[in-house]
């Protein structure tokens, strides 16, 4: 004699049959959450993770509503603001900008070593900023677009002022950090800022003191405390939820024209794969639109993962880590996270 199925169980079975996509979404999120929590617990620092599958809207959020320092991943909203002005006709891709001494700042990219007065097109600066992560190119583009239009654009793209802090150029980052060592850091020239950065990070504070010709013991903090205080200001920081929203809107074509979207993605090394951070853990048969960010004890990797054939079947990933070695420890952590995402969020394509 066949037993009748209890009404409650029958409802659950029907729901599972009717909504298999929702059940699979719960499965990948639960599996990934367990692995993210394990990785976070084993890490010497803190980990924030946001993953969203655009095909079904399912999302994993691990510390993603907190503010995270963006580092060079702030260059993507800078590029969006520039290309929005191109789409509106207020800038042209072939517009030439002359390098100024006040644009120069240490970090990635070769433009800092070039002669003031050298001209570059907006298109070239976008490629330099995103492809080479050139900080001087980023400063030039911030100057071209203006800080207020940049902030308005980013605030809208990220979903409101609660999702992103004040964006500045990369010289202001250095000045704000060094000012926590001593207020006289405000008079450091751009060339001196570049020279100070030649010192290894543990000796960076001492390099500031020597450059300012201050007596021993004049500094108010060490370099770790100076950076920690700057990060606490919330400048150049955003939630991963907000960053993910910007990436999703880019993929859906809601922020830029098709031509500008394509230009942005190509500059973000779309289709070019390496073995750095998340890339090392993700399958090679997937394409990645991405940008990394690195600063003292901070690391981020943001991107959109797509199948080789393209389309809207994409997964948005935004990851940051804090209070750990931004190179080796972050690289290993993000690689393991890439493998975890591949085995869960990307496994049911």
Image: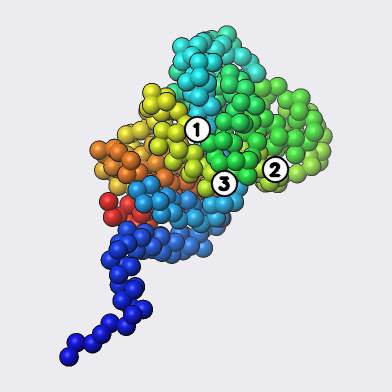
Image quadrant of residue 147? top right
Q: Residue at x 36, y 60 (%)?
A: 22
Residue at left offset 32%, top offset 58%: 21
Q: CA distance from mark 3 to mark 2?
A: 14 Å
Residue 154 position, x and y percent, is 57, 34
| Residue 201 shows up from this direction | no
Sequence-first disc among 2 and 1: 1
- Asked whether the beta carbons under mark 2 and mark 1 sit within 8 Å of each other, the answer is no
Question: Is 192 placed above or below 298 here?
Answer: above
In this view, the mark in front (3 or 2): 3
Q: Are marks 1 and 3 in contact (CB under 8 Å)?
A: no
Q: Position of residue 130 (x, y in %)?
A: 46, 29
Separation of residues labelled 2 and 1 (CA atoms)? 21 Å
Q: Residue at x 66, y 32 (%)?
A: 174
Q: Which residue is mark 2?
A: 233
Q: Are marks 3 and 2 in contact (CB under 8 Å)?
A: no
Q: Which mark is residue 239?
A: 3
Q: Assess disc 3: are there few (<14), some (14-19) or many (≥20) residues with their C-alpha within 10 Å of its C-alpha.
A: many
Q: Which residue is mark 1?
A: 76
């Amino acid at each position: 004699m066949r037993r009748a199925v209890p009404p409650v169980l029958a409802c659950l079975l029907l729901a599972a049959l009717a909504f298999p996509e929702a059940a699979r979404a719960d499965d990948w999120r639960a599996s990934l959450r367990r692995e993210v929590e394990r990785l976070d617990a084993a890490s010497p620092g803190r980990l924030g993770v946001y993953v969203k599958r655009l095909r079904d809207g399912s999302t994993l959020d691990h510390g993603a509503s907190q503010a995270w320092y963006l580092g060079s991943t702030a260059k993507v909203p800078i590029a969006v603001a520039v290309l929005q002005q191109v789409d509106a006709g207020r800038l042209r891709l072939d517009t030439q900008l002359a390098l100024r001494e006040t644009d120069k700042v240490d970090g990635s990219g070769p433009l800092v070593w070039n002669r003031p007065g050298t001209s570059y097109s907006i298109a070239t600066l976008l490629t330099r900023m995103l492809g080479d992560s050139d900080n001087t190119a980023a400063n030039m583009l911030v100057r071209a677009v203006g800080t207020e239009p940049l902030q308005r654009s980013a605030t809208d793209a990220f979903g409101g002022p609660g999702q992103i802090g004040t964006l500045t150029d990369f010289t202001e980052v250095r000045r704000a950090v060094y000012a926590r060592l001593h207020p006289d850091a405000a008079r450091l020239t751009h060339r001196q800022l570049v020279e100070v950065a030649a010192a290894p990070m543990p000796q960076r504070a001492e390099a500031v003191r020597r450059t300012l010709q201050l007596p021993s013991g004049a500094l108010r903090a060490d370099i770790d405390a100076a950076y920690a205080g700057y990060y606490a200001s919330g400048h150049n920081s955003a939630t991963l939820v907000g960053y993910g929203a910007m990436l999703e809107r880019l993929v859906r074509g809601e922020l830029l024209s098709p031509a500008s979207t394509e230009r942005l993605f190509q500059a973000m090394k779309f289709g070019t794969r390496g073995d750095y951070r998340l890339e090392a853990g993700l399958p090679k048969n997937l394409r990645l639109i991405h940008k990394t960010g690195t600063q003292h004890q901070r690391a981020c990797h943001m991107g959109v993962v797509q199948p080789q054939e393209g389309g809207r079947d994409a997964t948005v990933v935004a990851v940051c880590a804090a209070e750990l070695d931004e190179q080796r420890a972050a690289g290993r952590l993000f690689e393991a996270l890439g493998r975890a995402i591949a085995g869960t969020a990307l496994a049911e394509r």
